[in-house]
Amino acid sequence: MSDLTRPTHPSRELTITSAANPRLKGLLALRRRRTREETGQTLVEGYEEIGLALSAGVRPSTVYVCEALFSPSGRAGSQDIGHQTDLLTRLRDDRVEVVHLSRSAFEKVSYREGPDGLIAVVDRVGVTLADLRVDGPDHLTLLSQGVEKPGNLGAMLRTADAAGVDAVVAADPVTDWGNPNVVRASKGTVFAVPAASATTAEALEWLAANDIRLVVTTPETDLLHTDVDYTGRVAIAVGSEKHGADRALLDAATHRVRIPMFGLANSLNVSASAAIVLYEAVRQRDAR
């Protein structure tokens, strides 16, 4: 059992004050993809993200806390804040190991601006294509190909969760689902939406085997995204930020669609493009 997951008795919670502690070095190592793949673990930071992970059935092995960074109970605009203590109680009740950190130690391992005093170690995120459920006549998949930026991948997960997407597939991904910045940008929805990684060839074989039509966004077409039928079993695909969808994806498409552009820029942010087309699919399905 690794140092990160070594259990302690709930009544004897460990306290770390030194930023040079070996366990903190282990936490920092989980920012690297290789370490995440070797250990099968990743990090989740923040009250909202950890709470959503718990709601999705994830049980952390360890939670690192700094109560000096907890928000005071009250209101911030329209939101209630200051519930970190409630979440900590919930974790203790589930017998999750709790490690207390000094402010300096916590700020060393935190990977976000304005940390709220909670970091959890959880099992690495993501499933295989074979694990994705594709039953039902209205299955909807979001396929991203070669997306480089963790923030965009996370933003697409948030949209997929909100739109009720059944699965998200990263084809030839540059990053992994367990990247802490993907988890952060997704606000924890990476734990709520079934997400898989594969090569483009594997993803196309999976779509064909499950009779899922493929709609690919590209400027290389005259067909508007609103002029396609998204009911039934459909996958909506977006390409990389730099190059868009590659030829293999375009050649496999049932339809190639474009989003109308009226400004000087010739493309949208990839997560914005995914959101626009996904919600056209939602609109059509609701109308039906």
Image: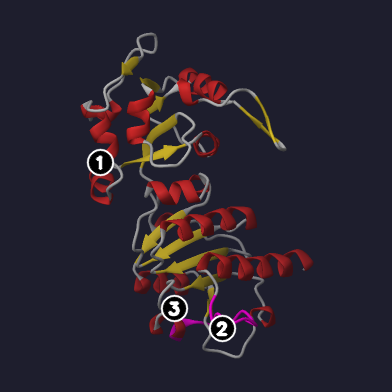
Residue 245: which numbered mark, if any? 3
Residue 255: which numbered mark, if any? 2
**Circle 2 SS class:** strand
Q: In the rendered image, which quarter contains the C terminus?
A: bottom right
69 and 11: which is toward the camera: 69
Is residue 264 rendered magenta in the image? yes
Is residue 276 rendered magenta in the image? no
Residue pointed to by mark 1 = 29
Residue 191 falls left or right of residue 263: left
268 and 246: which is toward the camera: 268
Q: Report the residue at 64% width, 79% height from top.
A: 225
Identify residue type, mark 1. Ala
Q: Give the magenta-colored segment's residue range.
A: 251-267
Q: CA distance from mark 3 to mark 1?
A: 33 Å
Q: Report the residue at 45% width, 47% height from top.
A: 183
> Relative to residue 62, is residue 184 depicted above or below?
below
What percent of the width, then of the height, locates residue 36?
28, 45
Q: CA distance from mark 1 to mark 2?
A: 43 Å
Q: Nearer the viewer, mark 1 or mark 2?
A: 1
In the rendered structure, which disc, 3 or 1, sits on the residue that comes first in sequence?
1
Identify residue type, mark 2. His
